[in-house]
Image: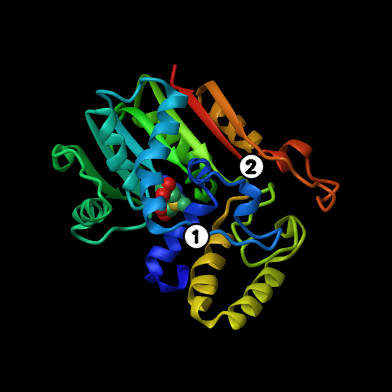
Amino acid sequence: MIKSLPGAVRRFLAQSLIRAPALQRLLGKSRIAVSGSNGQKFVPNLDEWIHSHYYTVVDDAAHFCGDIIRGKSILNVGCGEMLTDFGLLRLDPHSITGIDISPKPPGHLEQVRAKLAGNGIQVPPSHADKLSFVCYDGENFPFADGHFELIFSWSAFEHVANVPRVLAEISRVLKPGGHAFVQVYPWFHCLHGSHLTDWIAEPYFQLRRPVEWVRTELERQAALRPAEADFILGHMFPEYRSLNKKSARQFYAEARNAGFQVIKAKLITYEQDLSAAPADTDFADLMIFGTMMLLKKP
Ligand SMILES: C[S@@+](CC[C@H](N)C(=O)[O-])C[C@H]1O[C@@H](n2cnc3c(N)ncnc32)[C@H](O)[C@@H]1O
């Protein structure tokens, strides 16, 4: 199925299927069965993926955060395609600004709206007034101090190169007393932390193998699957290289160093066979697949 989809769609699918715990629940599958280490490959169809980003991600965030979204001016850090921003409109925020280092083409928001409509999702008419997108340099938010009431971030912080700097910017643009909801999946040290387990089966290779070995393995896989070669080598390998290799505990410490109170946290974890885990990797780092945290600016 995945081979019949356009490249950009396949990239999004592959990104999402290994990141969104909401998607896993939607599909009723074990995370471990999703990809890689046990030889199974599991790719959701496009409808499921769109619905998960529009409905389930938002519902999971709202369930975790409580009713703090309604009426708020929100900044979505690492917004990606912005399906979730459209989904957040269901919770009646004042406005949502998506920010990302990856630019969007002109008319992007209308394209996303049309994609949602094509999948049977009619977004509220208010979307044109409430949604906007800003591309930036990854370190300097182009907003005044205290501009936003709520920060939202889903499956983005493992890609942020300068986490302390972005946390400092989040703190700066957040009003005093404002909240930041940050979900991360997967953290680097867990089984799926490489994001490459659909192609490299060796458990925890990302903790042992040099980048040249990873590249060689992917080249071997690409040669076996020519139709996916661009995707594997042109997208997934650079994505692997861009991972900041942080752990949840580091992020927690950096959030506190940025002045945030961590007022709520949730671990995302699964039963694991740790027999191939490197002996020198911390148990908690191996076991924490993902986290949700609610930060508060005092
Ligand atoms: C896996 S995607 C997640 C996108 C979206 N949140 C979702 O759930 O579909 C990670 C996103 O983080 C973005 N990103 C990486 N570094 C960033 C930074 N410093 N600031 C903001 N976004 C960043 C990437 O460009 C990418 O769009």
**Percent x, y of residue 195:** 59, 57
Of the residues under marks 1 and 2, which one precedes in the sequence? 1
**Percent x, y of residue 82:** 32, 48
Badge 1 vs badge 2, beta-carbon distance below 8 Å: no
28 up-or-down from 171: above or below? below
Rate crowding at label 2 as few (under 14), some (14 to 19) or many (20 or more) other CA atoms within 10 Å.
Answer: many
Q: Taking 171 as reference, is 185 left or right?
A: right
User: On residue 14, which mark appears?
Assistant: 1
Gap between marks 1 and 2 measured at Cα:
17 Å
Q: Residue shown at 46%/68% (left/top)?
A: 2
Q: How is the image coloured?
A: rainbow
**Percent x, y of residue 218:** 63, 73
In this view of the protein, can residue 144 be seen by the observer?
Answer: no
Look at label 2 and name its amino acid.
Phe
Residue closer to the observer: 95 or 167: 95
Q: Quadrant of residue 91?
A: top left
267 up-or-down from 14: above or below? above
Q: Read off the residue under disc 2.
A: 289
Residue closer to the observer: 150 or 55: 55
Q: Residue shown at 75%/57% (left/top)?
A: 203
221 up-or-down from 119: above or below? below
